[in-house]
Image (tube, coloured by chain):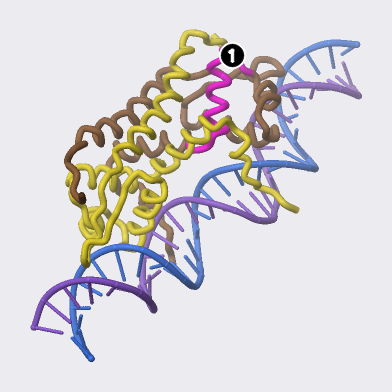
Chain colours: A yellow, B brown, C blue, D purple
Amino acid sequence: MVMAFNKKAEFSKKDQKAAEVAKVLSHPARIAILKTIAKRGVCVCGEIVAILPLAQSTISNHLKELLDAGLISGELDGLNCCYCINWAAIKKSHKAILDVFLELENREGMDCCK
Amino acid sequence: MVMAFNKKAEFSKKDQKAAEVAKVLSHPARIAILKTIAKRGVCVCGEIVAILPLAQSTISNHLKELLDAGLISGELDGLNCCYCINWAAIKKSHKAILDVFLELENREGMDCCK
DNA sequence: CCATATAATCGTAAATCTACGATTCACTGT
DNA sequence: ACAGTGAATCGTAGATTTACGATTATATGG
């Protein structure tokens, strides 16, 4: 009995993209990591581990998710790995989410039940 | 051996709130449901079921998540249940996400590795 | 070469999410 | 009172997420 297929593909591309962006931001650790990297400009994994209340391997996983989503880039620099924000991706992500809210807020006033 | 505790509580309130908003939007079905309700003004569960490629019980679950998050309100109206957007909550949510992006984008230019 | 340090990866466990069918509940209309 | 309809809830199964410790890989420094 097969269930729990991935039905996400059946929604509009726009909604899928917005949902993907939201998914990346759906854990406070990932938001905190992004803010930390943005704030410091330079950021090495060890610094993030020192700041956030999570184990090194857990941080590394969250970093990988941010990398996979394209929101940050990281390059090995000797022993350390230097991460930085991919601003183009951040702006695209921002727009994807913004569009959802704008499309919703555009309809304000057309309420039904009251 | 106890693992996988919920560590989310250890992050800042702001980041937690933003992550919660993002979580609600992290499935295209929920975005599509919000847009459908906003577009129609009036919206009954059955209409959403007819439009989206999901079973009635699945839609009902997504609606419950949106209700729990406070983004919509629903009242029983005879046989039908009329849902509408809670605009105040939408705006709060929008602001919570917006603040994350603004805080990030504020730091643009302070890059490290290049 | 060897000890050390940084960070990725692996293995795992628990929790949560997605999804559905079946059932139940509540209200209509007859 | 009873059949029918719309929607919530229940039970479930499988997938994914969160988290950690242990291990591995790689580079540096002596």
Residue at the image point whose x is 43% and y is 65% from the top: B2
Query: Which chain is disc 1 placed on?
Result: B
Q: Is residue A74 above or below residue D9?
A: below
In this rendering, would B100 be left or right of A20? left
Q: Is residue B27 magenta?
A: yes
Residue placed under numbered mark 1 in the picture? B40
Q: Is residue B114 magenta?
A: no
Q: Based on the displayed image, in which of its 4 quarters is residue B19 positioned?
A: top left
Q: Residue at x 30, y 42 (%)?
A: A86
Residue A60: horizontal and vertical position, in percent?
Answer: 34, 59
Q: Amino acid at mark 1?
A: Arg
The magenta region covers B26-43
Across and down, in percent, residue C1 comes to 23, 91
Position of C25 compared to A95: left or right?
right
Residues B110 and B74: in front is B110
The picture places residue A83, in percent across and down from the top left corner, at 26, 52
